[in-house]
Image: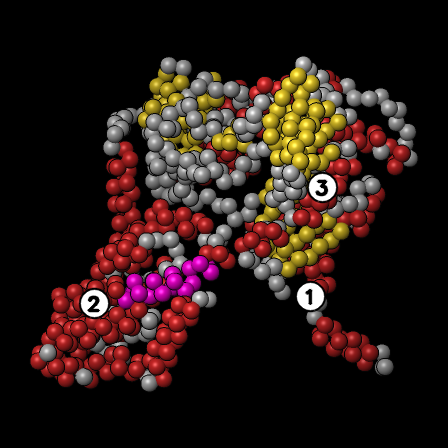
Amino acid sequence: MNNKKILIVSVLVLFIAAFFFFDLGQYLTLDYFKSQRDAISAYQDANPLQTALVFFLVYVAVTGLSLPGAAVLTLAAGAIFGLWWGVFIVSFASTLGATIAFLVARLLMRDWVQNKFGQKLKAINQGIEREGAFYLFTLRLVPIFPFFVINLVMGLTPIRVVQFFFVSQVGMLAGTFVYVNAGTQLAQIESLSGILSPGLLLSFVLLGIFPLLAKKLVDVVKAQKVYKDYEKPKNFDANLVVIGAGSGGLVAAYIAAAVKAKVYLIEKHQMGGDCLNTGCVPSKALIRSAKINRYLQRAGEFGLQASPGGVDFAAVMQRVHGVIKTIEPHDSVERFTGLGVDCIQGEARITSPWSVEVNGQSIRTRNIIIASGARPFVPPIEGLADVGYLTSDTLWQLERQPKRLLVIGAGPIGCELAQSFARLGSEVILLDMADKVMPREDTDVSAFIAEKLEADGVELRLSHKTVKFSKEGETKTLQVEHEGQVFGIVFDEVLVAVGRRANTEGFGLQELNIGTTPQGTLQVNEHLQTRFPNVYACGDVAGPYQFTHTASHQAWYAAVNALFGRFKKYKVDYSVIPWATFTDPEVARVGLNEADARQQGVDYEVTQYAIDDLDRAIAESEAQGWVKVLTVPGKDKILGVTIVGAHAGELIGEYILAMKHGLGLNKILGTIHIYPTYSEANKFAAGNWKKAHKPEKLLAYVERFHAWMRGA
């Protein structure tokens, strides 16, 4: 803390201490003002300006220092100055004092609070930046929360000082009027509860309803502003048009059809989106083939002999496409048409908030859901286009196995595919600018997976910066920089796996001025609405998570809010988001890991169980990995779980359920798990937590009890 802050704190402490030491609060009570009313009124009659000024300064000091007595002073203002002058004085004094308290909190605490709890406050900060004036207005309008608390808390947010001042001035005016008006009857009031006469109760009931009416009014005004350049149709062809038939779009259309809404689903490429055609499904099919080949190589560990028949890469890819074909009917036009969805193959274009064009047809719709997904991001590396490159979208068209495969990007996709191709016999180099693989994971997880990748033959080139690609004849080379040295890496094929970018261009969003975030996803609120209240987004295009299961999760909120939002809107719930990386061994996570907890300033306790001690894992020669659980210190409340090992993506389900429904480790420990299964690892992890928190003092008494029972 710098000298300026120390001085301010010292002055504040001095004033507050003096207030309580000299018992100045006795002069800010209802009884005191009632007893001195005549004397105060006489002084006020003789010295009106001086009385008003002194009262104003006292009110500012009380509110600025967050001292008790503001409510009584407001009543006293009515008794001393009458209704209109009392409202005038209190209105400006309360706002000035509130702003002083606001500034003090901001100066002394905001940086510390934002640094320590910034991640938790992210949603609040974004809400304040978007609609801070309305949030503050509704808090000011009805005294549900003490105003001094609002002053201090708002000082910790990004709201501007001028905005805080003027919104407070307007927001507190109605409540000030009610209290000052009650103060004009001060002689008849015996206690603060005495102001709640039937008439005043009615006033507060109206104040309670007013925020709801005010929000509706604000929504109407906002809607008129964004819709002013568009003409709303008098009737509609559809209740909902969904753009994109990936995971989010399919679920949104399914829900709409299930509740008998008229819904159109438009897809310009393939039903099922990336997940079915180029993502989750084909990659897991490839991973499975690679794992079986690895088992063949490990046959001796199981007492078996396997003749080395080699890899038929064309047959492997044929199986991958066969798996896609088998699952394809789940997401097919035929299935969704049968469910009541009007499926259209074509490229959609949003021409207004209520109209979508496709194949020369214009569809008038009450609501639109954008579920256009994402595509692989290709960085602008010199020469990349000249040598040709693969992405997670185009990889599945390979007919011949690359002898030397260069994978750029050591995130989940890069690690999964690098390991798979290495297990199938390719010489694989995995390159990344980061100093570890899977950088979002804890260091122990990244190091363990790196070790397993290298054991499978993947050559890791971490902390390497790409410079440029070149091609001479049939030889392809990447120049890289590492520790100040530049050298070349020769390869046959390069796979670019450095992330994905939301599909937001080419179908009318720019013309409608629907904005994007710094991450490139669409700007949506907590209800998944864009700037147009009837235009929603879900899935990869909306962020913040780019997982199939979160796209489906968001789709429910988008569809229900779009169809029934005029009655009830739901805020999308991101409280428990799990994910998994399907390397071997797998890595699954939910909630916080240690890196997240440290970054967010969350205190935690770690409990770990090593899977190499698990009977089922030992029996299957998969005795590797661990279960790591983060809990609130001293409690069994789960903050997050990381599982590394065989079937980690399945094992994490128990913890997802526990976190979602507030179950702690004691509940998991008290649940019967089948023996021998991998799921016992979850119970044993809970058991390790219990051992670390056993009641030592109680056990000492129990030991003495047993000794007494033995007659010892």
The prevailing secondary structure element of the residues shown in magenta is: helix
Q: Are marks 1 and 3 in contact (CB under 8 Å)?
A: no
The x, y position of residue 432, in whole percent, is: 64, 36
Mark 2, mark 1: which one is toward the viewer?
Answer: 2
Q: Give the residue pinned by disc 2.
A: 90
638 vs 336, nearest the viewer? 638
Q: Name the residue carrying label 1.
A: 693
Question: Who's the residue at 53% across and 22% down the image?
Answer: 271
User: What residue is shown at x 85% (from left), y 81% (from top)?
Assistant: 711
Q: Is residue 110 magenta?
A: yes
Callout 3 secondary element = helix
- Tell me the distance, in whole angstroms, between the alpha carbons under discs 2 and 1: 55 Å
Q: Dividing the picture into quarters, in which one does residue 231 lie?
A: top left
- Nearer to me, 256 or 514: 514
Q: Nearer the viewer, mark 1 or mark 3?
A: 3
Q: Is residue 295 above or below residue 207?
A: above
Q: Residues within 10 Å of mark 2 (few under 14, many from 20)?
A: many
| Residue assigned mark 3 | 449
* Residue 709 in view: no
Are the residues tagged 2 and 1 within 8 Å (C-beta)?
no
Q: Amino acid at mark 2?
A: Val
Observer-nearest of 340 and 319: 319
Q: Position of residue 38 (x, y in %)?
A: 13, 83
Vertically, is 473 above or below 628? above
Observer able to see residue 603: yes
Disc 1 marks which amino acid? His
Q: Earlier in the sequence, mark 2 or mark 3?
A: 2
Which of the two marks, 2 or 3, is nearer to us in this view? 3
Report the magenta residues as a range: 97-113
Determine the secondary structure under disc 2. Answer: helix
